[in-house]
């Protein structure tokens, strides 16, 4: 992944998508790459895992080599209309933005292309960032975002907007520049949803799927459950842990090969989780 320009991270809600995205950004910085982390949603998870309370629409330097921002649709729309469509810098965008927003409510792909446009615009700034890591939308929504450039190209036969959509699609489809990373858990619903998404992604050819990261994997206790007290809180905790490991083992057999990140017992907060995951990813 060290030669890529864009990594988008997705996964079912609650699997640790933001934690993994933050860890990948930290790993990139440690490798000496100028890195921009982008939250494509308003969840706030990416900022928390990078140790900041809030992220704004413009790049904010968190530490040397690492900046971050959150896509805010009104600001992204303003930037899209000015930079991508060619609206003059000091022109009033109120009526035009309102009309564009109304179009976005009716036409497929318009809202998504504004979000993707912000991410891909930063990717094109090759003199600024070596890598952009995007904490993407949940797996159920990622398809509409990846399809957005082609959807808009089909809607708009000619002109500047179609040209912009075309280069966006080209960046996403280029395996030398862009990749998608899926995060899952060794549990029924995340595993099944990830398997379905993998099939769709392979058939769509919109972006290269670089791999699947299985998060929060429990290690066996290493001793028989019968060891120790036969009742009480410790015994019940051991039985619960044993049962969870058995359940995970079943679903691990059905998840694609890829990095498996352990459940981090004792982590004091999101920022520590991201740092420890970065340590683990760095050693792979």
Image (tube, rainbow, N blue to C red):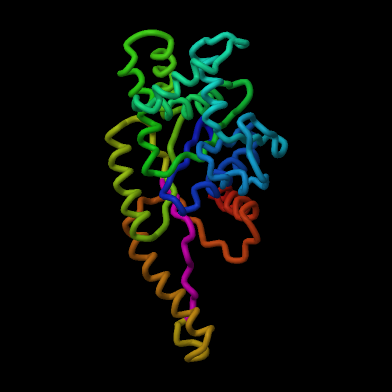
Q: Position of residue 111 (x, y in %)?
A: 43, 28
Asked if 112 appears above or below 41 in the picture, the reply is above
Residue 69, compared with residue 48, is above or below; it is above
100 left or right of 276?
left
Q: Nearer the viewer, residue 84 or 173?
A: 84
245 shown above or below 139: below
Q: Is residue 211 above or below residue 88?
A: below
Q: Residue furthest right?
A: 64
Of residues 67 and 116, which is closer to you in this image?
116
- Verify whether residue 217 appears in magenta: yes
Tell me where the magenta segment starts and ends, as one range.
212-223
Picture quadrant of residue 37: top right
Residue at image coords 43%, 10%: 160
Look at the image and say whether residue 240 sits in the magenta stretch.
no
Q: Residue at x 41, y 49 (%)?
A: 12
Which image quadrant for residue 60?
top right
| Residue 147 pos. (x, y %) | 35, 29
Q: Is residue 115 visible?
A: yes
Indicate the position of residue 25 as horizontal and vertical percent values: 59, 40
Badge count = 0
Residue 174 seen in render: no
The residue at 39%/65% (across/down) is 248
């Amino acid at each position: 992944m060290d030669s890529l320009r864009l990594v988008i991270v997705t996964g079912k809600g609650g699997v640790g998508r933001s934690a993994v995205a933050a860890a990948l950004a930290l790993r990139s910085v440690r490798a000496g790459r100028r890195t921009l982390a982008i939250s494509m949603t308003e969840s706030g998870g990416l900022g928390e895992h990078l140790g900041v309370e809030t992220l704004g629409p413009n790049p904010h330097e968190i530490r040397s080599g690492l900046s971050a921002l959150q896509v805010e649709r009104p600001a992204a729309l303003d930037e899209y209309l000015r930079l991508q469509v060619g609206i003059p810098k000091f022109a009033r965008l109120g009526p035009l933005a309102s009309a564009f927003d109304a179009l976005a409510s009716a036409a497929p792909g318009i809202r998504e292309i504004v979000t993707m446009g912000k991410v891909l615009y930063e990717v094109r700034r090759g003199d600024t960032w070596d890598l952009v890591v995007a904490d993407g939308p949940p797996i159920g929504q990622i398809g509409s975002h990846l399809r957005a450039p082609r959807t808009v190209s089909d809607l708009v036969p000619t002109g500047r907007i179609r040209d912009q959509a075309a280069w966006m699609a080209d960046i996403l489809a280029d395996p030398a520049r862009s990749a998608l990373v899926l995060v899952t858990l060794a549990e029924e619903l995340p595993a099944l949803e990830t398997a379905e998404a993998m099939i769709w992604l392979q058939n769509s050819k919109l972006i290269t799927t670089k791999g699947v990261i299985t998060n929060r994997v429990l290690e066996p206790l290493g001793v028989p459950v019968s060891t120790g007290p036969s009742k009480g809180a410790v015994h019940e905790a051991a039985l619960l842990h044993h049962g969870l490991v058995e359940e995970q083992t079943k679903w691990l057999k059905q998840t694609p090969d890829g990095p498996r990140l352990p459940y981090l017992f004792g982590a004091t907060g999101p920022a520590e989780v991201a740092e420890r995951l970065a340590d683990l990813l760095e050693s792979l």
